[in-house]
Every structure is written in structure tokens, then in C-alpha cells.
Amino acid sequence: MLARYPALLLAAALFLPGPVDATPRDRMLVSAAWLQQHLTDPDLVLLQLGERAEYDREHIAGARYLQLRSISDRPASGLYLEMMPIAQLDSALADLGVTARSRVVVYFGSDWISPTTRAWLTLEYAGLGDRAVILDGGLPAWKAAGNPVTTEVPPPPGATGLATTPDQALVVNAEWVQARLGQPRFRVIDARDPQFYQGLDAGSGERPGHLPGARSIPFTSVTDEAGRFLPDSALRRIFREAGVSQGDEIVAYCHIGQQATAVVFAARLLGYNARLYDGSYQDWGRRQDLAVEGGVAPTRGALISTDELAARLAANTVTVVDLRSDLNAYLADHLPGAVYLHYENLRVSGNGVPAGVLPQPAYAELWSRIGIRRDRPVVIYASGDAQNFNATFLAWLLAGFRQPEVYVLDGGYAKWAAEGRTLTRLYPEIATVKYSNDPYLLEVIEGEHVQHMLGQQGVVLVDVRPADQFAGTAGAQMRRGHIPGAVNHFWHDDLVTTGSTTVWKPVEALRATYVAQGITPDKYVILYCNTGTEASHAYFTLKFLLGYPDVRVYVPSFTQWAENADWPVESADAAAR
């Protein structure tokens, strides 16, 4: 676009971070040293992305705060992130001080790499070309070089705008992509995290999977831990392993068109012709006229009655696992064909903290040894009372492996025995099988992520322990109480006892109880207990009986949380004071 401004051509060339014949990396990235030398250049525009509070706390002198949505559009189609009409974008950039003479440097405050590359691509789309660059490593790199920061906000600019023409070829739509699928030297790159590409999680789309023929390059793979783009040699290897060769035409997509811009930027660092599918999988996945590959069906989890289990046992169509916590009880008698598994075999200490999950291959090896197969439904039972969560913990783990069908015996051993059904002392004959490691995506959340999500809108934290432990008047953990903001829903309250048997309450009664506490299906639900086993009981209820889409179990739960003195704990006593 500089050709439209011949009077500026020489000035722009003099302002480039490298010589005119420099490599793409030299033209697209600047270092802290380069920026320090050019910080007082009159045409320099500095834009920082990240949290506003982060900008207010510290930023490079002269930098303005850039909120990505101020240069993005959310059209009536419902797509979250689209390019603005050029007239609106021109006005938005003018408000930031960007003119036809500007050299714009965008950078992140901490780790907002993909919003930064999205801002860069927006500037490219607006016609700035080589006059839009990224500070490699962002504010951390600037500070690491010993450069100062400030809290002073620059005065409002008196900009006149760009009055330019957008680079329409940089951003494409679904029809453009579909018309080229399968063509030689056309490469589609999925920039989402692997679980979305593999179809284990639908993400923002309505169908799990990926675009036909797409290859995976996660957006996190093109930068290092410091947020710097990898060397060209490393990036070239990543693209080569994804089937990309020099001269190929690339289009990248992600969920909504943000993460993919990091891959587009990395591809252009190597000189590839790379474009962005702006609507990305949010657009493609919801359109039934467009094909999707690679979706993995979620686990079908449900309760099974004693009558139905008896029929399946007679037909020999299920694998049955006894999860009672007492081996002697299993030795005394058990359901026909049931293999014994103690729940402690499902947990291990991690970094000294007890009750964590095992590595993925260890679970696959365990499933192989006890005869679990993907082509055969699994029925799990526990005692049916206070240890019911042993069965749901295994169900939760198997759901992580996308085991097609997993059932929990409603009422457990106690109901089966009370009805006088067949029991045996014989051990089952187990044909050892090879259970594959993949697919695997456990719906678990780590303590660091829980801590980060405290107080966030749309998130509900549920403590499933007894009321006295929630209040902080009981409990064996290092500190007593609960995680701030948590709602107390005792897992056992999902059950009802009649005589000697305990079963789940009716679905509508369960739904009403959860909704009354603000635990609704539109929220991201985080469950915790003391270690994670009891939380799996509520997971089974919410995920499989009530159909909640976003449910995670925090393992090892309050056992870890209470030990970390930096993480807050609330209790009834503290609230009273």
C-alpha cells in the first residue's frame, strides 16, 4: 500500500527495523534494543495489549492501551471476532494515533501472544504492510533488557486516519476455503489445541473435529515460554512436519480467528503465502453443508438398573468392575463376572501431594489388565452407599478415554444383594487386551487454573463435601474451610435411601436442586472435594444424568489447595469475625 503514498516511500524505508532487502523476520519483528533506539521517533505508535489493569500498572513510555474489540467487529451473524468494515477500522486506528506515516509496534503486557498477532494482522489488513511490527517477547523482553516502564498515559492523538484500501486477500471466508480443499499445494492448518483438532472437544463449534484435510499446528507451538517466536529453523521444521512446503498456499483457522493469527504470523516469518479464515471453526462447525473430519463421540454415561444388568449378564454383553473399598467383601461374594479394582489403584502422589491422577499410559495398561475393551460396555458398582463415589471415579476416568458406554449400577451391591440376585465367589476369567492410549482428554482442572478462575463471570465452583467441612469445623486437611466463592452441594444429597438401598434421586429433582443453587448448565462448573473422588459423583450427575456440557473435576482438590499457603481459604469462623 506504500505505493499509494510515494512521498512516504523513502521515509518508511528509513524507518524499517532492517535493510530493505531484509528477511521477513527482520521486517516483522523488532527487538527491545531496536525499540529503545527508536522510542522517540515522531511517527512511532506503540500499542500494548493485555489486561487494562496491567497497562495501568506499567507500560513502555508513549504506549497506548489497545483493547482488541475496539478494532474488531461482532456482526449480526453471531460470529465472535471479525474484521471491521474498513471505514470503521480507519476511524478506530485514527483514535489510536495511527496515520499513513506511522510505524506501529504492537506488544503484549504478559502472555497475550495471539491477541497481539491478531492486532498485527488487523494492521496488515488495513494496509500498513511492513510498517506494522511486533515487539518480540513483549513487555517482559523490554524489562529484561533493563529498560524503564511508566504509568504515564500519553495525551490523546490528533490523527487523521489512513484513508486506505484493505488487503482483502489476507482474510478469507468459508466459501473460499471450500473451493480449494483438495487442491495441490493448498494447505489448511488448524491452530487450535490438539484436543479440538482431534475432535475430543467441540470448542466453539457445534460439531467436534476439524476441516477436511487439515493438519495441526497448535498456536502455542510457534513461540517459546518467554513468548518469543521460535527461530526460523525450528518453525520450518514444524511446518514441514505438517506437510507444508515452500510455495504452498496456507490458510489457518482456530476457534474464532484469533489463535490462528499466531500461525499466520509464523508462516509469514518463513516467507509463506498465509491467510486467515476469519470465521474459523465457529463458522465452519455450525454449517451443516460443510464437511468435518475426525470427530470423536463422547462417552455415553448412564445409570443401569439391576433388572437391565441381570439381562446383560445373561447375554454376556458387558464387563463388570467391582469398586468396593473392601477386598474382603469382594472375596466373600460379588456379582457374577465382576473383576475387582481398588480405587487407590487409580490415584498416585504427584510432587508429594497425595491422590493425584496417574499418567495416561498407566491407566491404559490398567484397563488392559482388567479386561476393559472399547467395543464392550462397562458396568461399575460400589457398595451403593457412602462409597458410591468409588464407582463414579472410575466412570469419570473412562470418560476421559472416550470409552463408548459406561454405566454405574444404581443402588450398587447393596441393592443387588437385597433383591436376592445371584452372587458368586468365583473369580472371572479375564482375557487381557491392549487398551489404546488414545483418544484421551480427562475433564480435570488443576489448582493453578482454579485459582485463576476465582470470581470470573460464568464460572461456578462447587464444594461437594459435608457441610461441616465446608464451614471449616471439620476436616483432616492442613487448613479447614472452603475455596472462596464456592457453593456447598453435598454429593450424597443426590441420593435417596429407602430401607437398605440407596439410589439416585429422579432427574427432575436433581435438576431443581442444582439450579436452585445457581449451578446451571450455561456455566463452567468446577467440582472439588477433599481429593477428587466425591467430586466425581457430582460430575456423573451433572454430565451424564443432567447433560451439563462444561464440567471439570479439580484433582487433588482441597488436599492440595489447603497446603498452599498462597491460596485463600474461607470458613464460617472467619466470616463471623
Image (cartoon, rainbow, N blue to C red):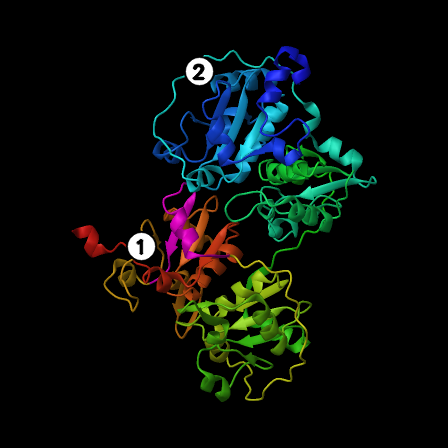
What residue is pinned by disc 2?
157
Residue 85 in sight here = no
Up-down relation of residue 285 to residue 332 (above or below): above
Residue located 64% across and 28% down the image: 19
User: Label for residue 266?
Assistant: none
Horizontal arrangement in the rendering, residue 468 relative to residue 127 (left or right): left
Q: Which portion, as a residue range, is magenta?
A: 444-465
Q: Is residue 509 magenta?
A: no
Residue located 59% across and 26% down the image: 16
Horizontal arrangement in the rendering, residue 254 relative to residue 383 (left or right): right
Q: What kind of residue is marked 1?
A: Asp
- Closer to the camera, 49 or 399? 49
If the image is split into quadrants, where does the N terminus sit? top right
- Closer to the camera, 59 or 12? 12
Alpha carbon of mark 2 to alpha carbon of mark 1: how far? 42 Å
What residue is pinned by disc 1?
566
- Closer to the camera, 263 or 561? 263
- Find residue 118 and report its horizontal and vertical position in percent: 57, 33
Residue 440 in sight here = yes
- Find residue 40 and report its horizontal and vertical position in percent: 45, 22
Up-down relation of residue 574 to residue 33 (above or below): below
- Find residue 126 and report its horizontal and vertical position in percent: 61, 21
For mark 2, give the secondary structure: loop
